Each structure stands twice: as structure tokens, then as C-alpha cells.
Amino acid sequence: MSTAEAVEQRALAASDETGSPFSLRIRFTRLQLVMILLVVSAISWRRGVYYSGGADAVVVAKAMLTVIALGLAFTLPKPDRRWSQVEVTPVLGMLGYLAIAVISALLISDETVASMILVIRLIMLAAALVLVARARPWREVVNAMLVAMLVVGAFASITGIGTLASGRLEGGIPPVGPNQICLMFSLPALAVAHRCIFRSATALDVLALPLLLGLVWATGSRTGLAALVLGMAIMVVIAPRISVPVFTAAVLSIPAVAAVVGLTSVMEEFVGRGDTASLLTLNSRTVAWSAAIDYPDNLLERLIGGGLALRQIPVSAMYRDTQILDSTWVSAYLQVGLLGTLALVAAIVTTLVASRRCTRPTRAFFVAAIVMLALVSILESGLFDTSVSFIVFFTTTLAIYAHPKRRQMA
């Protein structure tokens, strides 16, 4: 690393001690293009369709985008960065999870080819993120990820604005579900809130935060909204001091929220979605979770699962005999067994522990983001799959281990 770059890095590290290193500023760079391609390749292009083998136009197109992103990541300029500068802990954790997935695909899965293809896709996605983390400073990588989520989420929302008539904002092109749209707006909203809490906000940030919160609300994702509020609360708790504007806004929001809840039906309609859909959703999930406990046929399947292609299981319920898995933890138990589930738990716990050595402002955002993902993962699958959730989690993990203060204290 050159002297000028070293000085710049020290200056940025010093600013991390009190301010926010996160920004939603769009930069037309190769790194930004890589992140946008990865996000586009990871989101759903078809609603309610899960890969079970074979190849069609959508499968091939998403694979090509991942390959292009991987190639661009490999060609990113590397200013005297070596592989020794990339921490092996998150990579080893990922390899352990993938090893279990490969073994389960070969020994147990009824769809071996499909499971292996899903493993390869996940390897390619993780490899691209590792190459990016090696080539560029962690701030640039995380900010590029946030901008990519915002850009893709905004485009999908604009093209799907008509879905608001049904009560929930969904994507148009591609037809992204409301929960995924919520996630793609939640992380940028968390970053803007972080800038406000740690006294780095601009006038544009102050205007953007309520807009992003409104978009999250429009998706109707109750778990996503609750996770975002919890994430913001975590950042407030970790912050050493709260600025007067933020404190004032928090105090004024209490009676405002109380008035909305007590005097209007807005919150009731949001929570219940105006009908019995919430009860039906909860019922379908509990039926699937109960069936998942008894699904493995033997001890080996309980230990290593049935492969990543296992996306639905037979159930005994009214009007249906199969149920899609919609929880990361239930999916992990069935796909990679108890060993894979323990690997996932270990990845989250070790990442949270490692974040303790980051500067306080940076730690606040990373902990909030991981807790958000963990909460959402209870009711949604994808934390360790080719998804935006995985991109956020693995990028955050790589950034935590690449943080300069952590490296100095290690």
C-alpha cells in the first residue's frame, strides 16, 4: 500500500471513532457494478418458483450474471493487497457449511444434481464476495452493497407500483416479493439512521430516512419492520451519546406513534392486513414446522440433511399436501441437518463476538444488521442461500474481520 493510501486509511479509521463510515452515495465504479450484478442474480425472478433441476432462460441468465460478476470481481484493482490480508475465519465457516451440503447432496438427496448446482451457485456468490473483500477496503464494499440494494429495490418498486392496490408493495421487474423489497430498503434505512445517530447526517439523509421507512411500511412486512425498529434501537443503545436532534425526534415520536395506534386503525390494519391472512400464514408455518421435525427418516439425515434442493415437504393440512419451507432454521435443519444448523449458529455468534473489536460506531451498525437478519431468518428462508440476505450477512462478516482496529487488537 502506498504512503498516500496508508494516510487516507488512517484518516478514515480515525473518523470511524466518532462518525459514520456508511454512505448511500452512488459511485459509477466496477465494484458498484459487481454488487448490483450479484444482487440482481440473487433475487427471485419468478414468484413461487423454486429450483428443482434443469435449465431454462431464467436459470441460465442468473448463472451468467453471477459468472460475469465473479469475473469482474477477479479483475478489480488490488492495491498491494494479499490473500494473507483476508481473514480465513468466515471463509472456513462457509466451507464447512458447504461441505455438509455436498455430502448430503451425494448421500441422501433425491435431487442430487439440483442440490449440487445450488451448492455451486452459492460457492460462486461467496467467491465473488471474497474477491471483492480482498480487492477493496471494507467501507467501499459495504457501501457498494447498500447502494446496490437501494438501486435494485427502487427499480423493482417503481415497476411494481401498481401492486400497492393489493395492500403490499411488490416488485414489478423482476417480480420480487414484498419481504425481499422490505429487506432491500431496510439496510439502506439502517445506514441512514446510523448516520443520524452518529452525527454524520446531511439534509438529504434527514429527508431520505422517512421515505425509506415509508417504503418499508408499504411492503406490509411485519417481521421486517419489527427487525428494522429493533436494529435502530440497538444502534441507539450502543451509541456513546445521542445528539439533540435525534433525541428530540425520538421523544416526539412517542406521542405521535401512540396517537396513531390509539386513534386510528392504521396499526391494526398493518398487523392484521385487514383480513385473516395473518392467521392463515401463521397456521401454514406451524404446520410446516411440525412436519419438519418428523421429516428425516434416519439419524444420518438428521445430522446432515437432505440437500439444498429440498424446498418443500409433505404435510397433512386442509387444501394442500405440501408446504414450502419459509424459515432459515427449519430449512437448514432439513437441508444440512443438525450439523449444518450448528454451523450457521456458530457463524452468527462468532461474527457478533468478532464485532466487539470494531470501533463503536461501526460495531453498532454491524450488530444491528446481523440481529435484523437473524430475526427475519426465523420466518423467512435464505440466510445461507443464493439470496440478498446471504450477500448482506457474508459481506458484513468479511467487513468485520477486515476492520483495521480489529486486526490491530487481534
Image (cartoon, rainbow, N blue to C red):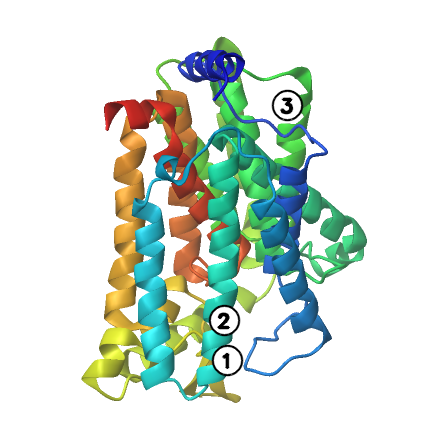
What element does badge 1 sit on?
helix
Q: Earlier in the sequence, mark 2 or mark 3?
A: 2
> Dot 3, how many residues are within 10 Å of its Cα: few (below 14), some (14-19), or many (20+)?
some
Residue type at mark 2 is Leu
Residue positioned 48% across, 82% down in the render: 113
Of circles 2 and 3, which is in front?
Answer: 2
- How far across and down, in percent of the image, does residue 378 sit? 39, 59
**Nearest the eye: 123 or 367:** 123
Looking at the image, is 128 positioned above or below residue 253? below
**CA gap, disc 3 and disc 1:** 44 Å
Q: Disc 2 on helix, strand or loop?
A: helix
Residue at which label 1 appears:
114
Task: Give coordinates of residue 259: x percent, y percent.
Answer: 55, 33
Q: Does 313 sit left or right of 147 as displayed?
A: left
The disc at residue 205 is 3
Foreground tag (3 vs 1): 1
Q: Secondary structure at mark 3?
A: helix
Identified at 41% across, 86% down, the residue is: 315
State the residue in front, 136 or 335: 136
Q: Mark 2 and mark 1 in contact (Cβ < 8 Å)? A: yes
* Image position of 144 with respect to 250: above or below: below
Type of residue at label 1? Ala
The answer to whether the residue labelled 3 contacts the one labelled 1, judged by CB atoms less than 8 Å apart, is no
Q: Is residue 256 visible?
A: no
The residue located at (48%, 32%) in the rendering is 138
How far is mark 2 from mark 3, CA to CA?
A: 38 Å
Residue drawn at the location 48% of the way across and 39% of the way down: 133
Q: Are marks 2 and 3 in contact (CB under 8 Å)?
A: no
Residue annotated with mark 2: 118
Image quarter (top left, top right, bottom left or bottom right) of the C terminus = top left
The amino acid on which the numbered mark 3 sits, given as a three-letter code, is Asp
